[in-house]
Amino acid sequence: MANAILSPRTGKAASFADRAYYAIRELIVTLELPPGAVVREPELTERLGIGRTPVREALRRLAQERLVEVFPRRGMFVTKVDVRDLARLCEVRVALEPEAARLAAERATQADLAELQGVLAELGGPRKRDPRALIDLDERIHRAIYHASHNPYLAETLEEYYAHALRIWMVALARTDIGAAVGGHHAVLEAVVRGDGARAARLMREHVESFEHTVRDVLLAE
């Protein structure tokens, strides 16, 4: 598994520490390691086929990003999902995601445009896809926009907050119209590809706010 892991930001082979980080984060975000689960370093080392030092570095990074937490004499645990986090995340994403879309529209290179047109074509393809495939497409859409902004600090920040938002989405997945949520990117991508930064920013803001409202309603109804 570890040998196949690439950096989402560059698409290139990641370091062992990065491989461990992306792999463990994926387990947390997809709820394979659910909220409150005990994180056992030896089990992760064996599961990922990566040494203890890279796994330890990855867990430190995930602790800084508040995806895992350490309690003295008790151990390490996956952080719990708090519905209040959704509003806090939205406050950050609604400020930064539109800016990333605007910059992507203004700065996208030919290679970026090819990638954006590729995910746009996928978005317009067959609608009957399983939820996990749709989530994968959603991730690739956001990361393509982040990358096309050509601001690595903005991209890295959004990558972190997107992971938190996606984990909350996974909790609400069974009762969320994921197809409609992912399909909402269509107009955003078209604006980015056309180089219309103002429209891309406005549509991205609307998309993030709509996502927050939909997931919040699901979580509060439980």
Image: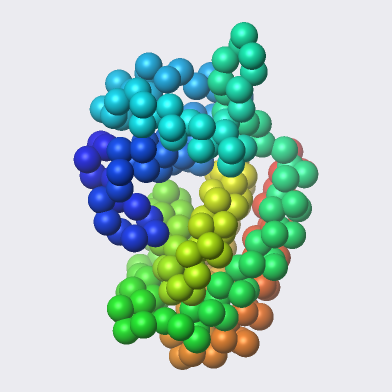
Residue at (30, 38) in percent of width and height: 16
Q: Nearer the viewer, residue 65 or 168?
A: 65
Which part of the image, by quadrant, shows the C terminus? top right
Quadrant of the drawing holding the N terminus: top left
Q: Position of residue 93 (x, y in %)?
A: 65, 62
Toward which corner of the image does residue 117 lie, by quadrant?
bottom left
Q: Residue at x 36, y 31 (%)?
A: 54
Q: Nearer the viewer, residue 111 or 124?
A: 111
Q: Is residue 94 left or right of residue 34?
A: right
Which of the pair 63/167 is nearer the observer? 63
The residue under the point 39% across, 59% down is: 9
Number of numbered tags placed on the structure image: 0
Up/down of 152 relative to 112, above or below: above
Nearer to me, 104 or 125: 104
Location of residue 22 by image quarter = top left
From the viewer's perspective, tell me whether residue 27 is left or right of residue 111.
Answer: right
Which residue, as the protein is rendered here, is positioned at the far top?
73
Image position, residue 204 (x, y; %): 61, 73
Residue 84 in view of the camera: yes
Q: Position of residue 180 (x, y in %)?
A: 55, 65
Q: Position of residue 146 (x, y in %)?
A: 48, 67
Give the residue at the far left of this rendering. 3
**Is residue 121 among the parts visible in the rendering?**
no
Q: Quick check: 72 above or below 162?
A: above
Residue positioned 29% across, 29% down in the render: 50
